[in-house]
Amino acid sequence: TLTQSTRPQRLLNAVQKNATRGDPRSVVKAIDDFCRHKEWAMNVGDEKGCILDSVVSEINPAAVLELGTYCGYSTVRIARLLPPHAKLITLEFNPDFAAIARQVIAWAGLEEKVQLVEGASGDWIPKMKEQFGITTFDLVFLDHWKDRYLPDTKLMEECGLLRKGSVLLADNVICPGTPDYLEYIRSSPRYESRYFKSHLEYTKVEDGLEKSVFKG
Ligand SMILES: Nc1ncnc2c1ncn2[C@@H]1O[C@H](Cn2cc(CNC(=O)c3cc([N+](=O)[O-])cc(O)c3O)nn2)[C@@H](O)[C@H]1O
Ligand SMILES: [Mg+2]
């Protein structure tokens, strides 16, 4: 019987068909082409992706946490810019998406830099230190369920995973929107925040990234 493919499976097929193994840039391009011309998907995309690239390059992080892997687009975008020995831990709740993301990350040749963990952020954040030998994260990219941004940020604070200078970069603060997170992070004296205006991936709808530096 013909198995119904899912959008993530069709996205992976597009990567395997159009991208060169071991070439992260071509994997990013293949996904953007697929999402712009074939099927929209909730990757951070090329426009916001350039802002993400500039923040990653500016920080040159040794330890990165990504919340919400989905198909691994932003995982590849970030990991391709990391210095040698740097580590990116990415949390994905949905096992089907995690399975696709692992193959996308492998196609890009970035398995060494990426640790994909299946499970809920709320369960795993308290285990980061003991399980992965993490002291603090230099950069956290928030792109998972929008109602988890705020509780997970408070959890990272409580677990001592942020240090003076740690950067939180949050996707979708306008669309779909994360009002409680924005209110908290912009009014807290413990963060210095800045909004990078952009558009929802592959559309003309306004969206943006909120970059927040933890003051310790
Ligand atoms: N607590 C969690 N822990 C670990 N993974 C999680 C958690 N919540 C969601 N995820 C995973 O993120 C992946 C992707 N995802 C992201 C979202 C939330 N993001 C969006 O809903 C979104 C929606 C739009 N949109 O609707 O236009 C645009 C975007 O850029 C988005 O990130 N929901 N699932 C999914 O595989 C899910 O299992
Ligand atoms: Mg997003």
Image (cartoon, rainbow, N blue to C red):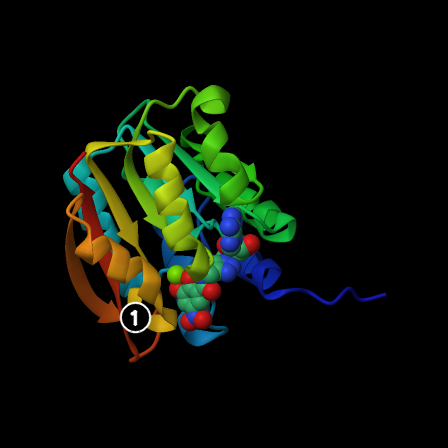
Can residue 172 be seen here? The reply is no
Residue at the farthest bottom position: 204
Q: Quadrant of the C terminus?
A: top left
Q: How many marks?
A: 1
Can residue 210 be seen here? The reply is yes
Answer left or right for 164 relative to 206.
Answer: left
Residue at the farthest right position: 1
SS under mark 1: helix
Q: Where is residue 27 in the image (x, y as percent from the top left)?
A: 41, 51
Task: Say which of 77 and 137 sits in front.
Answer: 137
Task: Say which of 78 and 196 sits in front.
Answer: 196
Q: In which quarter of the image is the N terminus?
A: bottom right
Answer left or right for 127 relative to 184.
Answer: right
Give the quarter of the image for residue 8: bottom right
Residue position for label 1: 174
Give the residue type that dot 1 points to.
Answer: Ile
Residue ID at (37%, 53%): 150
Q: Where is residue 39 in the image (x, y as percent from the top left)?
A: 50, 73
Residue ID at (18%, 56%): 187
Residue ID at (26%, 29%): 83
Task: Say which of 60 and 123 sits in front.
Answer: 123
Give the quarter of the image for residue 29: bottom left
Mark 1 nearby-residue class (10 Å; few <14, some 14–19, many ≥20): some
Q: Position of residue 68 (x, y in %)?
A: 46, 50
Task: Say which of 160 and 101 sits in front.
Answer: 160
Cβ of mark 1 under 8 Å from ligand 1: the answer is no
Asked if 168 appears above or below 29 in the picture, the reply is above
Answer left or right for 196 relative to 96.
Answer: left
Q: Where is residue 204 in the image (x, y as percent from the top left)?
A: 29, 80
